[in-house]
Image (spheres, coloured by chain):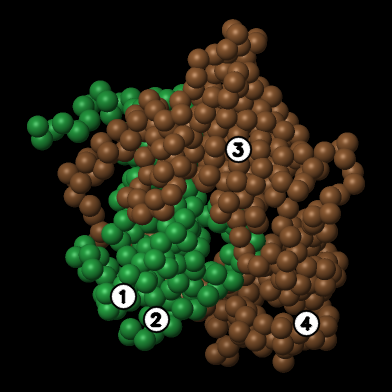
Chain colours: A brown, B green
Amino acid sequence: MSSATCPRLFEVEAMRDGRLAGAELASFERHIASCAACSREVRELEALAEGLRAESEYRPDELHVRRERTRLLSAFNRVLVAPEVARRPRFLLLLPAATALVAMAFVFSRPRAPEHGVRAPTTVVRADPAAVWSERAEGSGKKLFLERGVLWIQVDHAPGAGRLSVVLPDGELTDNGTTFTVSVENGRTTRVAVEDGSVVLRIRGEPPVTIGQGESWIPTVRAAAPAISSAVVSEPRSLPVASARPPSSPAPSASAPGPDPSSDFRAAMSALGSGSHREAAAAFERFLTTHPRDPRAEDAAYLRIIALQRSGDSGAMKDAALAYLRRYPKGFRHAEAETLSR
Amino acid sequence: MNGRHARSPAARDVPQPSDPELLRRLASGEIGALGELYDRYHAPIRRFVARATADAEDVDDLVHATFLAAATSAAQFDGRASCRPWLIGIAVQHLRRRRRAFGRLLALLASLRGVKSAAVDPRPALQARSDIERALLRVSENQRVAFLMAEVEEMSCAEIAAALQIPIGTVWTRLHAARRELRRALEEGS
């Protein structure tokens, strides 16, 4: 093909981003060999990347590198020696004074002497540099207060030792002798992953969840979520996701979310990835109907067009493209949708 | 001493530990492993952060925070052959936090001082940036980060989506927008 433009031009980017596979990829690669416009597009996109992959001329001087290296090692040493005073970057020093006062209050309320021979659990805590947290002894147990950031916690429960709990902005987590990680962002618990043992997570207004070894928990996204937030969390690569509710409490609470948009979106993506294009188009349509305010709705609307295009139903594809344009007149994929609507 | 950091011939013969081995040692609290990790990856991480941020005043802090977070969460490394994408993912999380926490505040301070956003990168070192690097600064930070992860770090869209905690469709749209904006900026520049 020798024309200046080609209706398959957008597939160059799709190929580059790994959206084409199998027969589609092979077909498009054959097409490129005979299409001047698409092969030029391939070269131009590669040139954009190539320019940046070349070594930058920006080189920090050796002395600066050594100084920064020393600063890093001494900061890590401080974390190892006194993890609760984790160093934060300079740009975080402007945190509200109230936070500092609260943190100081906790620092000065150090663990009290054990009572009646019952010892507090032995814990190892590693905090990410931006974490805001503290710890306090409470009777025979110990409480960690996590306001923000990520804590990796290992608890060794010797016989007779007390309990450890982590107080979160939106609930509490109780440990049952374990190694786990807990993350908090914007006043919400965003992830709990258990490497060993188990924990019980109690988010306010929701039934408690037991998270066992090798499992992780992420919050369910509400359909009415205002924007893309940290609650939209991908599953960890190596850990299965725990059930959002305990098996023993099937009745959802009043605040429990409706259908899970993440699993609906994943199902639609899976259908698209496996080549079931009609099924994918239907799944994306259902997603748009069920979760119209989900942050991924625009993606779903565009992917529905792609699924219909791949299914060969050009009429439905055009309708879907027009629907996208009506719904997202300034959408990211406006240009492609406009082309496909013609 | 000039040769303080130079490796002796014997040291050169010693096989370098793999990334997973380095992270295992780091997870056990071996501070020397952090030094080795820094020596191995500080340059690409610094380059990524410097390119990802339009204002480079806190590049050092972001790189520092990235390696420190890697050190404190080394036990969570998934054991892949290279930890570079993992480090990039951590750097991106710090970029996001920084943007959320201080973006509005800095803009407000700048407007109160009557200072316009710098049209020219203030760092002398960056004056040597190529046309494409300059054009990249015209792309929004979200799009720029996704573009760098895909095209420079050669991470898959699925890896980028996982690192940024966004849907893969959003990664595609950001890459598309970044390429469009880059081309526009380069055309205008030429």
Q: Chain of mark 4?
A: A
Q: Chain of mark 3?
A: A
Residue at 55 percent of width and 37 percent of height: A145
Mark 3 vs mark 4: in front: 3
Residue A122 placement (x, y as % from top left): 54, 18
Left or right for A283, reference A47: right
Left or right for A112, reference A182: left
Check disc 4 and report its element: helix, strand or loop: helix
Alpha carbon distance from label 4 to label 1 = 47 Å
Q: Against A94, is B137 above or below?
A: below
Tell which residue pokes out farthest to the left in this image. B1
Mark 4 vs mark 1: in front: 1
**Badge 1 amino acid:** Leu
- For residue B112, the mark is 1
Q: Mark 4 = which residue?
A: A320
Q: Against B128, is A251 above or below?
A: above
Residue B145 placement (x, y as % from top left): 46, 62
Q: Mark 3 = which residue?
A: A167
User: Which class describes the residues within 10 Å of circle 2: few (<14), some (14-19), or many (20+)?
Assistant: some
| Same chain shared by disc 2 and disc 3 | no
